Image: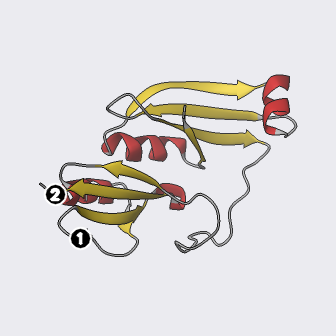
Amino acid sequence: MDNVGIVVDDLEAAIAFFVELGMELEGEAQIEGTWADRTVGLDGVRCDIAMMRTPDGHGRLELAKYHAPAAIGARPHNPPHNTLGMHRVMFAVDDIEDVIARLRTHGAELVGELAQYGDSYRLCYVRGPEGIIIALAEQLS
């Protein structure tokens, strides 16, 4: 896998959220032109992207802010966990409570509760900017 794409309205807020999670901004670019139109099947594409790299260097997120054509909001805005389609990306963290506290400074909220799966993991879902849901997993020793 090369990357996972997420369309956002506030690119800077999304970058700040994922930087707080430990990702690094790899680069930013503006995407437009016939090749972009043909690739995504839309006319007149113009968007800004930010490529975010995981700390281990093995994964990336591409955040995209569409200027044209305008992005279309998903309905409902904050869909429940059982909505069809891709709905979250999971990150392994060392201190889940610290990460939750730091993400809250960026407007993040727990979707449910912080829970423990046996003696293996502490887990939770967090809703961040644009309604993006991420999962956090702290492996227990």
- In the rendered image, which residue does mark 2 sit on? 140
Of residues 125 and 44, the one drawn nearer to the viewer in this rendering:
125
Residue type, label 2: Leu
Give the quarter of the image for residue 38.
top right
Q: Is residue 12 above or below residue 139?
A: above
Q: Is residue 141 left or right of residue 51?
A: left
Residue 109 position, x and y percent, is 37, 67
Q: Is residue 120 above or below residue 30?
A: below
Give the quarter of the image for residue 122.
bottom left
Q: Is residue 89 above or below residue 66?
A: below
Q: Distance between the residues labelled 2 and 1?
A: 9 Å
Residue at the image point whose x is 52% and y is 72% from the top: 81
Instruction: Assess disc 1: are there few (<14), some (14-19) or many (≥20) residues with their C-alpha within 10 Å of its C-alpha.
Output: some
Residue 15 position, x and y percent, is 45, 40
Residue at the image point whose x is 16% and y is 57% from the top: 140
- In the rendered image, which residue does mark 1 sit on? 116
